[in-house]
Image (cartoon, rainbow, N blue to C red):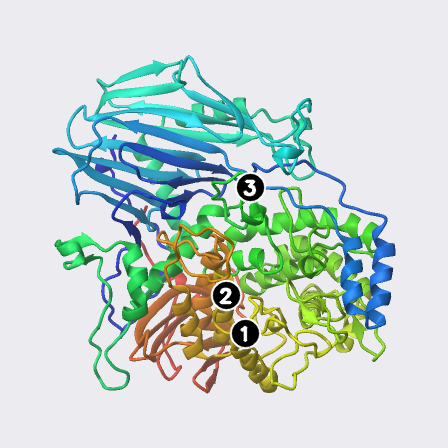
């Protein structure tokens, strides 16, 4: 059965449960990333994925390259991360810090280094070679349709229109490509598999292509000796073909290729698996057989038609993606009664290349954003971030690494390793406010593994209880310090930062079972380590020593560069956040009298507080060191403001003012993730002008030719965010930053449109955002002013919301679970009805 015979009925999601009564918006614009030609560079490709399997589609005509990834393919094996020599090195560093000899302490900190992380690898390539492939000028079109998570390539050769469709199914764990032509028997091509990893390919009797390979046991290929017995991760990919009746399938065994001749259409199915059995099992001891696993997986799905595979894929994806909608429009003026839309960049543009009805390539939209500030491009980037999170992080997969799951290199930048001093955390900032909470499950699995290895490192390396993690990790849950430079390597606050996500998950979901079974045990171990790591300071405070502010240096009093001192502002803010989390969690669980909680309560007021420097900014270190790089990319000392909660406009106006000064001092420039972090911080400060300024700063085109490591940020033509090179953190964090501009919350308070750029997004509507306290939030506005708000919490849940805030107006409220409430612009409830009253067509 072909796809044209199917009618897809979308199941209702959160955004479908409420509609405004007063705000009329334009029809939603298609959520598509578009291209006018094949990819010339990797960052021109179309990324597709299902959490575990990823592919990058280049869209070539005479030859097509589909680059493949599988999220468990890493170098290395499990190892012992402990080092009994580190306690002595730690004692030396602490003594030097106590003596004020910071540059010497920095040099001595090399004695605390651990091992390098291992390296994320790539699976390989599907290579397609086509006959008669000189396409007609102007007929080429390529797109990523975010709404269906489908990549498409279309072009014409002579009078035949060719179409390729690509998607990666999560329900069926398969990469699918359909190739079709508008004329019968017009599709002919050869297909093969290849990899730059050690591998072999062969054809089976069932006309399936099989590629078997192995990752290096060593981090670097040069470390592998000629006679070494390979012990790295094994993997297998299997490709199967479905072709139309009357077509011929030709075996080319000498080249390990299959050739399709004279088909109306052909469907390629690719499955893959590895010998990975968890972070604590050596691949050489694994009982998994990736070849038999892959063949079995293929046998279970190859009888499904393309239409069946596609409908199952779309239904699964849209169940997540359709939970949130965002529409933004800009008017010709605020408060002048005029609501004419100036430039809602249409899907087509009659002037583009002088042709009518030609889709504007996304690269052109990025270029023109500096002048047109098209709000629909912000919508697209917002939803692209949600699309990528769904595509690279699903329950049961590995945690999203530095590039999500997409990688073309044997040695990707920074090993593509999960980096825990901002990047990994930013990857998951959007999961809760942007209604993708299931996508955060791999992070929790990862934290559990870190805690197991981290407890051994805490005990041996630091002689403490609990568990610890440092700034970089890998698939083997490496918790120990890194190599390279003390300014990043020895930072032991990574486990504490990721632990804050555990409590945040509870504040959004009010899932008490999660709090009991997952969050609290991990928070206990983390807090135990922090209590032991803190030491008595000379001034009566508890301090951390050694301490760094991630990746930043200072000028020590002796004039030398240093990075190691005591009680950096970020250290204290993270510890305070974890302590607040475990205290709050203990209150929910009735464990406030536990000895650990009581000790935390005693320690919390003795934490070194944030201080304001003479120049009015927040001090980054406990002492007012000279900063040799005032515009450094990290804003670590603003953690307490965002993503933390210890600094608020209401409680700490003087610190918030100092935070503004800090942002001015840091400047706008920085990698993509730095831009997104600054956007979120400005939003938390309810400064819409500067939050929007950072949004605009991100939407700048980056030259893909220059792949050197830089710090300029921006976007590539496929909307991937740049450090450069590509890192996924800014993409995944951007939706969270935008949601922070529209909604802010605590367990009891909800702030509406706190940082809305009224002149830029004068009219709009957002549906399905999540707020703390278990609430779903929908807001519509016009001429920059609030029009209506829709709120509810689940029928079987609870609601802790007590107050609504908008532009200085506060209204007390009491909401019942399972009831949808509509509030007007004066925050008066004008309508309510039960969720149980809603009816939808049966699916």
Report, in whole angstroms, how far the alpha carbon at label 2 lies from the one at label 3: 24 Å
Pick the front one: 441 or 687 = 687
60 over 378 or under it: above or below: above
The mark nearer the N terminus, 1 or 3, is 3
In the rendered image, is residue 382 in sight? yes
The residue wearing badge 3 is: 411
Mark 2 and mark 3 residues within 8 Å of each other at the beta carbon: no
User: Mark 2 Cα within 10 Å, few/some/many (few <14, many 20+)?
Assistant: many
Quadrant (top left, top right, bottom left, bottom right) of the N terminus = top left
257 over 804 or under it: above or below: above
The residue wearing badge 1 is: 666
Query: Horizontal placement of 682 versus 768: left or right?
Result: right
User: Mark 3 Cα within 10 Å, few/some/many (few <14, many 20+)?
Assistant: some
Which of the 4 image quadrants contains residue 715? bottom left
Mark 2 and mark 1 residues within 8 Å of each other at the beta carbon: yes
The residue wearing badge 2 is: 670
Looking at the image, how many numbered discs can be counted on the residues?
Answer: 3
Report, in whole angstroms, how far the alpha carbon at label 1 lies from the one at label 3: 31 Å
- In the rendered image, the residue lying farthest to the front is 559
Report, in whole angstroms, how far the alpha carbon at label 2 lies from the one at label 1: 9 Å
Q: Secondary structure at mark 2?
A: loop
The dot on residue 26 is: none
Q: Residue at x 43, y 85 (%)?
A: 807
Q: Position of residue 175 (x, y in %)?
A: 40, 35
Q: Position of residue 822 (x, y in %)?
A: 37, 74
Query: Horizontal placement of 131 versus 601: left or right?
Result: left
Q: Position of residue 716 (x, y in %)?
A: 38, 54
């Amino acid at each position: 059965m072909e796809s044209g015979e199917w009618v897809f009925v979308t199941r209702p999601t959160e955004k479908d449960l409420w509609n405004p009564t007063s705000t009329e918006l334009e029809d939603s614009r298609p959520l598509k990333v578009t291209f006018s030609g094949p990819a010339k560079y990797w960052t021109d490709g179309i990324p597709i994925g299902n959490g575990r399997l990823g592919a990058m589609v280049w869209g070539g005509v005479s030859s097509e390259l589909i680059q493949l990834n599988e999220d468990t393919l890493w170098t290395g094996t499990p190892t012992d991360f402990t080092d009994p020599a580190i306690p002595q090195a730690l004692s030396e560093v602490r003594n030097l810090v106590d003596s004020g000899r910071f540059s010497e302490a920095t040099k001595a900190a090399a004695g605390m280094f651990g091992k390098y992380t291992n390296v994320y690898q790539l699976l390989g390539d599907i290579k397609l070679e086509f006959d008669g492939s000189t396409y007609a000028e102007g007929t080429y079109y390529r797109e990523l349709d975010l709404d269906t998570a489908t990549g498409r390539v279309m072009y014409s050769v002579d009078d035949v229109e060719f179409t390729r469709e690509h998607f990666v199914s999560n329900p069926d764990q398969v990469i699918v490509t359909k190739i079709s032509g508008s004329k019968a028997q017009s599709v002919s091509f050869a297909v093969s598999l290849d990899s730059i990893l050690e591998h072999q390919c062969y054809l089976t009797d069932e006309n399936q292509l099989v590629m078997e390979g192995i990752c290096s046991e060593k981090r670097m290929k040069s470390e592998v000796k000629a006679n070494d017995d390979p012990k790295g991760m094994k993997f297998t990919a299997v490709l199967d073909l479905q072709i139309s009746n009357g077509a011929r399938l030709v075996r080319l065994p000498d080249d390990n290729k299959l050739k399709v001749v004279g088909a109306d259409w052909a469907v390629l199915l690719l499955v893959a698996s590895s010998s990975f059995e968890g972070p604590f099992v050596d691949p050489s001891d694994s009982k998994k057989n990736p070849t038999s696993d892959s063949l079995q997986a293929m046998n279970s799905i190859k009888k499904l038609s393309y239409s069946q595979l596609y409908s199952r894929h779309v239904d699964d994806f849209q169940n997540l993606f359709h939970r949130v909608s965002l529409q933004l429009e800009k008017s010709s003026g605020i408060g002048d009664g005029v609501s004419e839309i100036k430039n809602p960049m249409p899907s087509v543009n009659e002037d583009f290349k002088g042709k009518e009805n030609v889709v504007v390539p996304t690269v052109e939209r990025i270029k023109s954003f500096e002048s047109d500030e098209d709000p629909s491009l912000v919508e697209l980037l917002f939803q692209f971030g949600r699309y990528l999170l769904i595509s690279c992080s699903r329950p049961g997969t590995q945690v999203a690494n530095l590039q999500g799951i997409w990688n073309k290199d044997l040695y990707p930048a920074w090993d593509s390793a999960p980096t825990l001093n901002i990047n990994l955390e930013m990857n998951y900032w959007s999961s809760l406010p942007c209604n993708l909470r299931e996508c955060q499950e791999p992070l929790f699995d990862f934290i559990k593994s870190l805690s197991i290895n981290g407890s051994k490192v805490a005990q041996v390396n630091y002689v403490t209880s609990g568990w610890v993690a440092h700034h970089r990790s890998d698939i083997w849950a490496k918790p120990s310090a890194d190599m390279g430079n003390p300014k990043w390597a020895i930072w032991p606050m990574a486990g504490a930062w990721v632990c804050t996500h555990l409590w945040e998950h509870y504040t959004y979901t009010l899932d008490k079972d999660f709090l009991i079974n997952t969050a609290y045990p991990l928070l206990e171990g983390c807090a135990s380590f922090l209590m032991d790591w803190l030491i008595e300071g000379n001034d009566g405070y508890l301090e951390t020593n050694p301490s760094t502010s991630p990746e930043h240096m200072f000028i020590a009093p002796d004039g030398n560069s240093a990075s190691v001192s005591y009680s950096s502002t970020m250290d204290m803010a993270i510890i305070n956040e974890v302590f607040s989390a475990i205290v709050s969690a203990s209150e929910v669980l009735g464990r406030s009298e536990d000895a650990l909680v009581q000790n935390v309560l005693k320690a919390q007021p003795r934490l070194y507080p944030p201080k304001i420097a003479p120049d009015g900014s927040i001090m980054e270190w406990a002492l007012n060191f000279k900063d040799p790089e005032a515009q450094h990319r990290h804003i670590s000392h603003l953690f307490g403001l965002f993503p933390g909660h210890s600094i608020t406009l209401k409680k700490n106006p003087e610190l918030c003012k100092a935070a503004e000064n800090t942002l001015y001092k840091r400047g706008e420039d920085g990698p993509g993730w730095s831009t997104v972090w600054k956007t979120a911080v400005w939003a938390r400060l309810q400064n819409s002008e500067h939050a929007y300024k950072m949004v605009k700063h991100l939407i700048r085109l980056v030259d893909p030719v220059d792949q050197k490591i830089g710090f300029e940020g921006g976007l590539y033509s496929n909307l991937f965010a740049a450090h450069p090179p590509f890192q996924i953190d800014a993409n995944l964090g951007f939706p969270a930053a935008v949601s922070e501009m529209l909604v802010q919350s605590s367990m009891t308070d909800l702030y509406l449109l706190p940082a809305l750029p009224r002149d830029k997004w004068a009219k709009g509507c957002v549906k399905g955002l999540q707020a703390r306290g278990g609430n779903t939030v929908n807001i519509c506005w016009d001429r920059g002013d609030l029009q209506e708000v829709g709120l509810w919490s689940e029928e079987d849940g609870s609601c802790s919301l007590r107050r609504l805030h908008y532009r200085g107006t506060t209204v007390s409220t009491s909401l019942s679970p399972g009831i949808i409430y509509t509030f007007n612009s004066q925050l008066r409830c004008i309508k309510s009805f039960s969720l149980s009253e809603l009816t939808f067509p049966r699916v």
